[in-house]
Amino acid sequence: MNIANLSTNAVKTGKIALVGNPNVGKSVIFGFLTGRYVTVSNFPGTTVDVSRGQLWSGGQKCELVDTPGILSLYPRSEDERVTRDLLLREAPDLVIQVTDAKNLKRGLLITMELADLHIPMILVLNMSDEARERGIEIDTNRLASTLGIPVVETVAVTGEGMAELRRLLPLAKAPLASVRYLREVEAAFDRIQTQMPEAWQKNLDSKLYAKSRFVAETLLANDESIWHTLERIFPVIEENSRLKAQTAVHAVLKDFLRPIHILTLNSRQQRAIEISGEITQITGKLKSSWAQKLGAWSMRPWPGYLIMSGILYLMYEFVGVFAAQTLVKILEDGLFGKILNPAVTKIVELLLPVPFLQEMIVGPYGLFTMALTYALALIFPIVSAFFLFFGLMEDSGMLPRLAVMLDRMFRVMGLNGKAVLPMILGLGCDTMATLTTRVLDSKKEKIIVALLLTLSVPCSAQLGAMLGMIAGLSWKVFALWITVVISTMFAVGYGASKFIPGARSPFLMEIPPIRIPQISNILKKVRARLVWYLKEAVPMFLLGTFLLFISDKIGLLGIIKTIANPLVVHFLGLTEKSTEAFIIGFLRRDYGAAGFFVQAQNGFLNPRQVTVALIVITLFMPCIAQFFVTIKERGLKTTLAIAGFVMTFSIAVGGLVNWLLKTDLIQL
């Protein structure tokens, strides 16, 4: 790295932001720089995770922030908005941009955008070993001179180049590389900057002042979300000032036949091609390895669908069977059922002689016997297994390939291939699957998947009880059940995609090469995510259980049973005891299914009633844990709307099937 042209004055590095495309190794570099001091939390006002840690640079303790992977600072997804907002609102002193050395042109597009923010930065060319294997040689000295910033080659998984990266932190500078825009585009930027609220123009000490050109381009890209960010930085923005700027934007846009953001993108792409062409040389012929062959096969219809089916099967077996059944049984029946719950019950009865407090802690709706048992004995092993499998998929390069192969199927429901992860995970645990809707790009897609998880994806424990009900009955029962559930999923997904405002996010995903994952890196990720689960999700279980306890004490649960009995018995054609199964099903889906299973085993349900019960309990309300996690992820208003629709829809479908079977329009 040639630093002759770089300033030797050390920059302040109080806060450092890691920025880059998805799948370029940012998280691995974050782990090397911060060690074990990591916190994971939502960025304010969003459900997007941001990791924060500490490192030392030049004797100074710094905060390192790992931002979500982006394709651009002009956002098309919530992840990109979070990264953009973080750079503006938190004004980091330094940016470390991580890019894939094999795909330098794509990384330089973000470098050109970061240049408009005038933040000192360092460019990291990660996976440089893979670039060399492909015969790609990069002249880092010339690249550093062209950009005016330090450039370092790294192999994050092995630690190569990390010491050099630490050494270069104080030498970061704002990029000097400029993009040649059309004269009319430059004039448009200047015109918008002069129409911005006076509060920005007068505040010369504000770090945002130097970024006004970036803000102007964002406004001209028709991104209204930037105003919410600006209002947080400048709490007082006169309404007439905002209207003045918006009017200027609309006036400028009328003067252009093509969208301005397309023109600026073309200019940046041209500049990125020029720079990469000047400093990159192909020195050898690419040799095809087994990993590259596997990567190519997994992207073709055949044997791609076979490979992906095998991966989904392994995921279900590992998460939905091994974790959700075997490990859960060991923890729930063994550790908690035979050891912890009896011990805690004795301690509480000894130390707290008040019956009300005893029931609140160790009763049927106890904070320990229900909430913590559910969170730690049931959900925690499923969460751990999923995070481990997800990490393997992520680091091996199979995750984006899985999404690509299933993209076409999910388009019918207004989704893209990324939705496959929470949908498949829902077969293990819908609560955990609701949390993983964060991998989706848009609010609309997250709501649709949350709705479909609530409506038509049974968890593995519930699925086991329901399959037991079908055993011994006609194959027509199973065929009718699975047909109704799958058809309603696609019908509701299609309808929701038309009703919920917003567009399906573009399916843009980097396809990295197939790699052998580094177990140490995966374990670091799993640890950080499990800490987040314990801090964020477990309190929701405690709150939900406490509300159920109070509802039982004041007789609300009994009132619900009395009101629901006529609907269950007359409209659905089920037994009175079925009402209890539905109420218990809200506490735990598998308990509700088990209630119907016991009735079927004892001969209290005929084939028609078994069929109706199967359909309704599958489509019915989510368990309380999923309900409260959905509140946390999507908000109370959206969750109540989903719950109201699902409950009404499931009963309506159950009543229709009951009528069709009674009138012999469908025969079992």
Image (tube, rainbow, N blue to C red):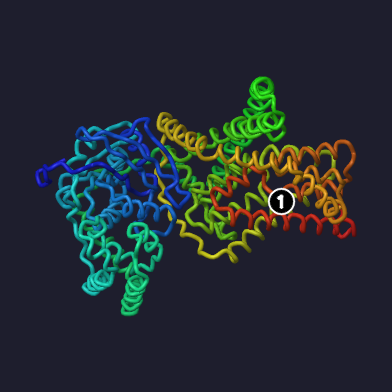
The residue lying at 50 percent from left, 48 percent from top is: 438
Which residue sits at x=35%, y=67%?
A: 221
Front residue of 86 and 352: 352
Q: Is residue 572 visible?
A: yes
Secondary structure of residue under mark 1: helix
What is the tally of numbered marks visible in this picture? 1
Observer-nearest of 315 and 9: 9
Vertical position of residue 560 compared to residue 347: above or below:
below
- Say whether residue 651 is left or right of residue 178: right
- The furthest residue to the left: 4
* Residue 161 visible, this orientation: no
Q: Is residue 349 above or below residue 616?
A: above
- Where residue 328 appears, as percent x and y from the top left, is 64, 30
Quadrant where the N terminus is found in the figure: top left
Residue 364 location, quadrant: top right
Task: Indicate left or right for 137 with 234 as reference.
Answer: left
Tell me which corner region of the image, top left, top right, bottom left or bottom right, holds residue 470: top right
Q: Residue at x 63, y 53 (%)?
A: 452
Residue found at x 63% / y 30%: 368
Residue that label 1 marks:
619
Q: What's the residue type where badge 1 is placed?
A: Leu
- In this view, the residue in front, 294 or 82, is 82
Within 10 Å of disc 1 (Cα), the crowding (few <14, some 14-19, many 20+) is many
What percent of the width, then of the height, locates residue 322? 62, 31
Q: Quadrant of residue 316?
A: top right
